[in-house]
Image (cartoon, helix red, strand yellow):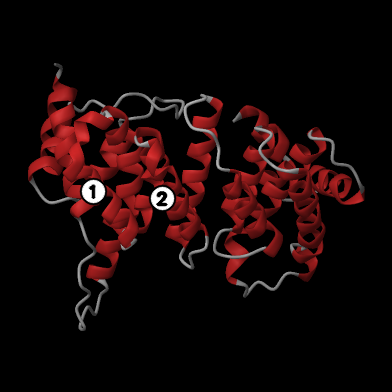
């Protein structure tokens, strides 16, 4: 074992196993499960250590916020840790653990933590629950649907990531994709609902690419694009709108979604209008949306 691996084992793995859970260790362990192209790889963690970290994470609860938390330290700590537990477990820890390794007690803790919902990012692990315990698939779907219907960015973002993981499992033929989740994603796009619109548009494109959107829902996506075209027009946009920071990204995703719909046989003025708009948009991430998509 080289110096880098020994340092990682001491500063990250041992900290999470024996010390207090912290944001930086969670991010480091999660990052170790991806190569330099962003593809998932095996994290450098043993099964006993993975089980110890998993146990601590599913038992973690947000701190009770003090009434005089003047500088917001407790709230920020809850966001920093709670927002990173799901990705760390789903990317780095659970792939290192077999169903038999978990045992009945730890599995029960996992399901109870998902049901509790106080750590919103934990829903990212729901597809792994369905993968490791097929008899719990309906529970996993229910947890994801609750997240998609949530009112916080973390809840909806994490649930959308879970949908994307279900897409990958479906492609690998390990877990059949739950089509009700496709309908839920389309519903967010159709309602143009925030939080969640940006992630839903991107997820809808991936669902289309995987041929996991019904014909009826494809029509609903076209209708959503028709409404979003004038709603996101720069000339009529109110800069005080809180969605201003994601406006160009929403338009980028709309262009990509229009292209995905066209590939699946959708046609009509709104699809062509979005593709034309994308080609002439003054903002680079929108103008080069399709080339970025092909490159990524």
**On the rendered image, what quadrant is the C terminus found in?**
top right
Using the image as rendered, state which of residue 225 and residue 180 is in the foreground: 180
Left or right: residue 90 versus residue 273 is left
Q: CA distance from mark 2 to mark 1?
A: 12 Å
Using the image as rendered, state which of residue 221 and residue 136 is in the foreground: 136
Q: Position of residue 91 (x, y in %)?
A: 35, 36
Q: What residue is rendered at 10% in x and 37% in y?
A: 14
The local secondary structure at tag 2 comes to helix
Tell me how many marks there are.
2
Left or right: residue 206 versus residue 50 is right
Residue identified by numbered label 1: 108
Residue situated furthest right in the rendering:
269
> Which of marks 1 and 2 precedes in the sequence?
1
The local secondary structure at tag 1 comes to helix
Residue identified by numbered label 2: 139
Residue situated furthest bottom in the rendering:
67
State whether residue 197 is above or below residue 91.
below
Q: Say few, some or many: other residues with alpha carbon within 10 Å of mark 1 (under 14 / 14 to 19 / 20 or more).
A: few
Residue situated furthest top in the rendering:
1
Q: Position of residue 149 (x, y in %)?
A: 52, 63
Q: Say few, some or many: other residues with alpha carbon within 10 Å of mark 2 (under 14 / 14 to 19 / 20 or more).
A: some
């Amino acid at each position: 074992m080289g110096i880098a691996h020994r340092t990682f084992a001491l500063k990250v793995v041992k900290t999470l196993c024996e010390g207090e859970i912290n944001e930086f260790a969670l991010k480091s362990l999660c990052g170790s499960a991806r190569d330099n192209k962003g593809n998932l790889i095996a994290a450098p963690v043993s099964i006993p250590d993975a089980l110890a970290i998993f146990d601590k994470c599913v038992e973690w609860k947000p701190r009770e916020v003090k009434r005089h938390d003047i500088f917001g330290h407790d709230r920020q700590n809850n966001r920093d840790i709670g927002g990173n537990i799901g990705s760390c477990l789903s990317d780095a820890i659970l792939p290192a653990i077999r169903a038999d390794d978990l045992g009945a007690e730890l599995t029960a803790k996992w399901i109870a933590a998902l049901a509790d919902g106080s750590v919103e990012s934990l829903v990212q692990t729901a597809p792994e629950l369905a993968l490791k315990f097929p008899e719990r698939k309906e529970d996993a779907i229910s947890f994801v649907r609750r997240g998609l219907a949530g009112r916080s960015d973390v809840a909806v973002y994490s649930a959308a990531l879970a949908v994307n993981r279900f897409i990958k499992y479906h492609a690998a033929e390990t877990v059949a994709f739950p089509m009700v989740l496709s309908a839920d994603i389309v519903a967010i796009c159709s309602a143009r609902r925030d939080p969640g619109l940006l992630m839903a548009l991107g997820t809808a494109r991936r669902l289309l690419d995987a041929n996991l959107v019904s014909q009826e829902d494809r029509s609903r996506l076209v209708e959503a694009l028709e409404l979003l075209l004038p709603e996101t027009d720069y000339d009529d946009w109110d800069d005080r709108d809180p969605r201003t920071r994601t406006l160009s990204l929403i338009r980028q995703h709309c262009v990509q979604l229009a292209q995905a719909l066209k590939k699946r046989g959708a046609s009509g003025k709104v699809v062509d209008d979005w593709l034309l708009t994308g080609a002439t948009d003054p903002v680079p991430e929108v103008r080069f949306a399709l080339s970025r998509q092909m490159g990524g």
